[in-house]
Image: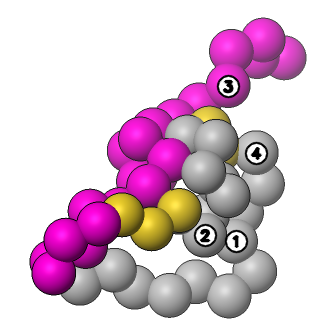
Amino acid sequence: MRTEQEQCPYCKGQGYFQLLLGGTENCPGCEGTGTHSEPMTAASPVKA
């Protein structure tokens, strides 16, 4: 059993996404925590 929490694969542990027009948005995968707790039920691809 692991004691460390893994980084969220969607935001790479940052907890947010940098928006193209400025500002940030909380990551829907980890709800802004930056750690991966459970898989997302509806995966939405992030386009860069």
**Which numbered circle lies on residue 40?**
1
The one of 16 and 36 positioned closer to us in this rendering: 16
CB contact under 8 Å: marks 1 and 2:
yes
Write down the residue under mark 4.
37
Residue at the disc numbered 2: 28
Image quadrant occupied by the N terminus? top right
Q: Is residue 30 magenta?
A: no
Q: Which secondary structure class fits the magenta region best?
A: loop
Say few, some or many: other residues with alpha carbon within 10 Å of mark 2 (under 14 / 14 to 19 / 20 or more): some
Q: Residue at x 64, y 42 (%)?
A: 33
Tell me if label 3 and label 4 are in contact, CB under 8 Å: yes
Q: Amino acid at mark 4?
A: Ser
Q: Secondary structure at mark 2?
A: loop
What is the CA distance from the residue labelled 3 to the residue labelled 4?
Answer: 7 Å
Mark 3 lies on residue:
5
Position in image of residue 14 (x %, y %):
41, 41
Q: Secondary structure at mark 3?
A: loop
2 or 3: mark nearer the eye = 2
The range drawn in magenta is 1-23
Q: Upstream in the sequence, badge 2 or badge 3?
A: 3
